[in-house]
Image: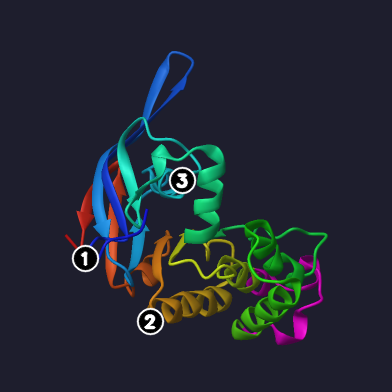
Amino acid sequence: MQQQPGEPLVDVRQAARTYTMGSTRIAALRGVSFQVRAGEFVAIVGASGAGKSTLLNMISGVDALSSGAVFVGGQNIQQLGERALARWRGAWLGIVFQFFALLPSMTLLDNVMLPMELAGKYSRAERRERAAHLLEAVGLRDHLHKLPSRVSGGQQQRAAIARALANDPPLILGDEPTGNLDSASAQVVFDLFAGLARDGKTILMVTQDEALAARMPRRIELGEGQIVRDSGA
């Protein structure tokens, strides 16, 4: 399904997720609804356990909703089968995690090439050229052939951002991408995200860094699985 003109890029409708642990039911999300337009840079904030990461898992299709729906680009992702969901995720999403999730036995260049290979996009020569260009764009021109263990945490996160951009997805999800970095590295990573938003990427970023969240154009605050404040509403 293609996104229609005027539609929000992300449309979350009464999303709920309940987990069962023994005889205990835990409501991680309780009927969350909001929309995000293309090009928005949105902070998702809240205390630990508020449902922030669960919400990202719903939007990415990593976990299934208990009720409600999530549309991305006009597609109800809960209706996709496993293979279709994997193809959709490769085309529509770039995900940046707190702990980088780079494959340790592969160079930074190969890590960035991997999503293109999995999606079957571009020739091998084009993949190498694109991966090198993306790594240069995040300031890693001199580190293409290094393993992740041979660069700093901040550099690993910049490589992870390059990897998230490999297939040119319209939506970037960041799950506390600065949470494991020192303040200087966190600033560099934040500036990269801000630049991507200025270039038209849509970014939802979970963060517990109030200073960074305050600089983002829109803030969605969760509490006990519900939206308690949305500056864009």
- Please name the amino acid that badge 3 sits on: Asn
Q: Earlier in the sequence, mark 2 or mark 1?
A: 1
Q: Is residue 66 above or below residue 212?
A: above
Q: CA distance from mark 3 to mark 1?
A: 25 Å
Q: Secondary structure at mark 2?
A: helix
Judging by the rendered image, the residue that carries numbered circle 1 is 6
- Please name the amino acid that badge 1 sits on: Gly
The single residue placed furthest to the left in the displayed view is: 233
Residue 45 placed where, x, y %? Answer: 35, 56
Q: Earlier in the sequence, mark 3 or mark 1?
A: 1
| Identity of the residue drawn at 60% across and 81% down | 138
Q: Secondary structure at mark 1?
A: loop
Q: Residue 142 appears in which quarter of the rendering?
A: bottom right
Q: Earlier in the sequence, mark 2 or mark 3?
A: 3
Question: Looking at the rendering, in which quadrant would you find the C terminus?
Answer: bottom left
Q: Circle 1: is it few (<14), some (14-19), or many (20+) Cα within 10 Å?
A: few
Provide the residue span drawn in magenta.
Answer: 139-156
Q: Is residue 118 left or right of residue 220?
A: right
Q: CA distance from mark 2 to mark 1?
A: 20 Å
Is residue 136 inside the magenta stretch?
no
Judging by the rendered image, the residue that carries numbered circle 2 is 198
**Tags 2 and 1 in contact by the CB under 8 Å rule?**
no
Circle number at residue 57: 3
Q: Is residue 101 above or below residue 130?
A: above
Q: Secondary structure at mark 3?
A: helix
Which is nearer the eye, 199 or 167? 167
